[in-house]
Image (spheres, helix red, strand yellow):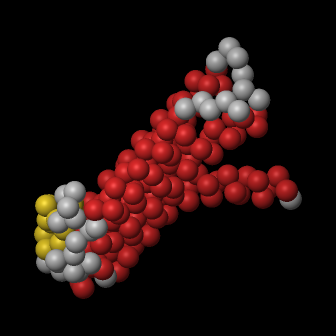
């Protein structure tokens, strides 16, 4: 039973982030009729929207689809990194390999959360919505920190 629970947790950890943009897409699908005819899809450093989309299938579902693709490519890159790691002449002990996988896996959770939240903004944000600069700076900082910790081999 303990082994089954461990496998279920692993599946949830690796598949779970993809549910965030999928949930955003479902939300946008359910409330498509209530979405505004024009909505922001990109913001500048000062928080003002600089790119707009019209209400269409492509415009509304652009965020979740791009988010899913970015996460898919990140997951494939992770698999390639760990496949090369497994084929290396010097093998890591399984616990160390597992820790490295989890660190890289958290990057997909961060990507999923970011794309999930940004994808639903057309449905919840008014047209004059200003995305605060501190939010964008915080997200960028967290991405850099997670990416560095995931890719650097920190020895204790």
Vertical comparison of 146 with 124: above or below: above
What residue occupies the far right of the structure in this picture? Answer: 1
What residue occupies the far top of the structure in this picture? Answer: 89
Q: Residue at x 72, y 26 (%)?
A: 92
Q: Residue at x 61, y 55 (%)?
A: 13
| Residue 89 x/y as whole percent | 68, 14
Vertical comparison of 147 with 140: above or below: above
Q: Residue at x 24, y 85 (%)?
A: 34
Q: Quadrant of the C terminus?
A: top right
Res. 32 visible in picture: yes
Res. 21 visible in picture: no
Question: Which is more toward the observer, 122 or 152?
Answer: 152
- On the rendered structure, is 53 left or right of 122? left
Q: Quadrant of the N terminus?
A: bottom right
Q: Residue at x 47, y 35 (%)?
A: 77
Q: Quadrant of residue 44?
A: bottom left
- On the rendered structure, is 116 left or right of 146? left
Vertical comparison of 129 with 101: above or below: below
Q: Quadrant of residue 11?
A: bottom right
Q: How many marks?
A: 0
Vertical comparison of 20 with 3: above or below: below
Question: Which is more toward the observer, 117 or 3?
Answer: 117
Q: Quadrant of residue 82?
A: top right
């Amino acid at each position: 039973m303990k082994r089954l629970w461990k496998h279920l947790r692993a599946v949830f950890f690796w598949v779970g982030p993809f549910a965030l943009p999928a949930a955003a897409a479902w939300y946008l699908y359910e409330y498509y009729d209530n979405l505004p005819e024009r909505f922001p899809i990109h913001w500048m450093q000062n928080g003002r929207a600089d790119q707009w989309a019209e209400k269409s299938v492509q415009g509304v579902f652009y965020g979740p689809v791009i988010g899913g693709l970015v996460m898919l490519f990140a997951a494939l890159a992770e698999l390639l990194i760990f496949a090369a790691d497994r084929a290396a002449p010097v093998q890591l002990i399984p616990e160390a390999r597992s820790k490295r996988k989890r660190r890289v896996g958290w990057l997909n959770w961060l990507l999923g959360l970011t794309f999930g939240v940004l994808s639903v903004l057309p449905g919840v944000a008014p047209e004059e919505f200003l995305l605060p600069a501190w939010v964008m700076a915080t997200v960028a900082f967290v991405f850099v920190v997670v990416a560095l910790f995931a890719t650097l081999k920190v020895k204790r």
